[in-house]
Image: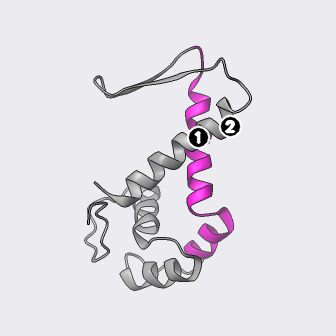
């Protein structure tokens, strides 16, 4: 239901295609939604980490993220909005990454993070 989660998940899956499936048509990934666990057939956890890195870097480039962190005002919604406008990144994606990297998820925000309109 959150735009940051949706964007990351979509980019993660695109990462699997770009990094692991584009040149290897024999490889397969199965996401078992019923058990809540992703199962890689014949592959290692390394591929999941690579897809995660791909998603992080394609949603917010490393230079952009370093710039954001250097001027980071903790949990200031205005900072997310200004930076997001500068680089055309939805502020919810910035907020989601900051929450994930700090392991702080209970911060109140006025940023609309809902995927549904």
Horizontally, residue 24 falls left or right of residue 85, namely right
Say which quarter of the image contains residue 60. bottom right
| Residue sitting at the far top | 42
Say which quarter of the image contains residue 88. bottom right
Q: Who comes first in sequence, dot 2 or dot 1? A: 2
Percent from the top left, x then y, of residue 103?
39, 55
Q: Which part of the image, by quadrant, shows the C terminus?
A: bottom left
**Image: magenta residue range:** 42-69
- Residue shown at 56% from the left, 27% from the top: 45
Q: Vertically, is 44 above or below 99?
A: above
Q: Distance of mark 2 from mark 1, alpha carbons?
A: 8 Å
Which sits in the foreground, 107 or 91? 91
| Residue sitting at the far right | 23
- Residue shown at 62% from the left, 56% from the top: 57
Percent from the top left, x then y, of residue 23?
74, 29
Which residue is tagged 1? Answer: 51
Contact, mark 2 vs mark 1 (Cβ under 8 Å)? yes
Which sits in the foreground, 110 or 33? 33
Which sits in the foreground, 103 or 52? 52
Q: Vertically, is 29 above or below 6?
A: above
Percent from the top left, x then y, of residue 6?
40, 52
Q: Vertically, is 42 above or below 82?
A: above
Which one is in front in this view, the residue at disc 2 or the one at disc 1?
A: 2
Q: Name the element at disc 2.
A: helix
- Residue shown at 47% from the left, 57% from the top: 101
Horizontally, residue 6 falls left or right of residue 14, namely left
The local crowd at label 2, few if under 14, some if 14 to 19, many if 20 or more residues have their Cα within 10 Å, is some
The local crowd at label 1, few if under 14, some if 14 to 19, many if 20 or more residues have their Cα within 10 Å, is many
By secondary structure, the bulk of the magenta-drawn segment is best described as helix
Residue 19: assigned label: 2
Which sits in the foreground, 20 or 65? 20
């Amino acid at each position: 239901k959150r735009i940051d989660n949706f964007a990351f998940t979509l980019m993660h899956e695109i990462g699997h295609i770009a990094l692991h499936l584009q040149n290897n048509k024999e490889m397969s990934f199965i996401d078992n939604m019923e058990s809540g666990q992703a199962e890689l057939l014949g592959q290692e956890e390394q591929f999941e980490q690579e897809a995660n890195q791909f998603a992080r870097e394609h949603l917010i480039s490393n230079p952009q993220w370093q710039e954001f962190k250097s001027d980071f005002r903790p949990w200031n919604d205005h900072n997310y909005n200004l930076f997001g406008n500068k680089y055309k990144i939805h502020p919810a994606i910035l907020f989601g990454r900051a929450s994930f990297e700090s392991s702080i998820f209970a911060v109140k925000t006025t940023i609309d993070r809902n995927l549904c309109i």
